[in-house]
Amino acid sequence: MASAQITDNPLLFAERPEWQDVVPLEQYEGVRPLAPIFYTPEYKDATDYFRGIVKSGEKSPRVLDLTENIIRQNPAHYSAWQYRYKTLMALNAPLDEELRLMDELAVKYLKTYQVWHHRRLLVQQTCKPAPELEFIASCLQVDAKNYHTWSYRQWLLAHFNDAALWANELEFVDRMLDADVRNNSAWHHRFFVVFQSGVRQGEEDRNDVVRRELTYVKVKISFAPNNASAWNYLRGVLDISKTPYSAFTSFVTPYCEAEPPQLDDTSTDIMDLDDPLPSQDAQLPCTAAIEFMADIHERLGGDSLRVAIDHWSSLANTHDTSRKKYWEYRIREALSNVH
């Protein structure tokens, strides 16, 4: 299909002979709004003709040109996307060609939801999900944390649920986290792959999977202790496996200290995978670790509640003063529940 690239001096649709049979409809026809939006002449012209097309119900190749023109000017124009898809279906248009156009627009407008929704509709029709994984990976090289890109990847995996699609997904997430261990989107995707999308071959022993994931996240924390994403992942694994936080006291304790533990010469190349210590250049104490330790003692209750309050007080007054009011709230709530 022809491309409707916008040039520096675009010819208005009102000036094109092939569009003379269409009656354009103005947005504010017969109305004088108090605060009208001042569109560019090109955008106003295109959308006026779009409303005329929608009114007549026309679905033709020139409608694809018109909707592409509008989308390039305003990629969030939901109605233009919707009508474009209906036109593609009515014309039985080649969707592989449409996907190539989307390859361009998705990268150009990564943060526009409508681009990804349109792509989803197309892939549902083509039933060719495999090439999408490579395309998504290339988009994540542009913006590694883009919500819409990760959301589309999760939809693709879950909708088609093909073992071949899932086969290398954990390795893909490993590479993303190796590139940026603080990529919260990648951590969220790992949790989705491991715990929220069914059980795949080789992962039937869920206790073994939990142990693997706990080891994985603890090692990642040891290299970058002040990484909220990893601590949240740790909490998620403990919660879904119903593992008490108190079982991790020995792991968390060194991260609450002011300095990393001093290692002797014989232990510098050995890592305890059960309780890996913070790296020697870690910035301690770690606020997430102090919060975790406070939660341990709050859950234990009784005399341990006073220890939790001490941890919250240290966060409020020293280690996390930007959230002082929140920690003070936690203290008040804990004291109000003391009988």
Image (cartoon, rainbow, N blue to C red):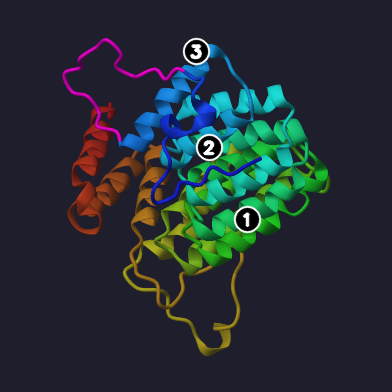
The kind of residue tagged 3 is Lys
> In terms of image quadrants, where is residue 49?
top left
Say what secondary structure mark 1 lies in.
Answer: helix
> Residue 240, percent across and down?
59, 38
Tell me the residue at 69%/47% (across/down): 132
Alpha-carbon distance for marks 2 and 1? 25 Å
Mark 2 residue crowding within 10 angstroms, few (<14) / some (14–19) / many (20+)? many
The C terminus lies in quadrant: top left
* Tag 2 and tag 1, C-beta contact below 8 Å: no
Say what secondary structure mark 2 lies in.
Answer: helix
Nearer mark to the viewer, of 2 and 1:
2
**Residue 241 appearing in the image:** no
Q: How many marks?
A: 3
Q: Nearer the viewer, residue 112 or 95?
A: 95
> Residue 165, percent across and down?
76, 46
Residue 26 belongs to magenta span: yes
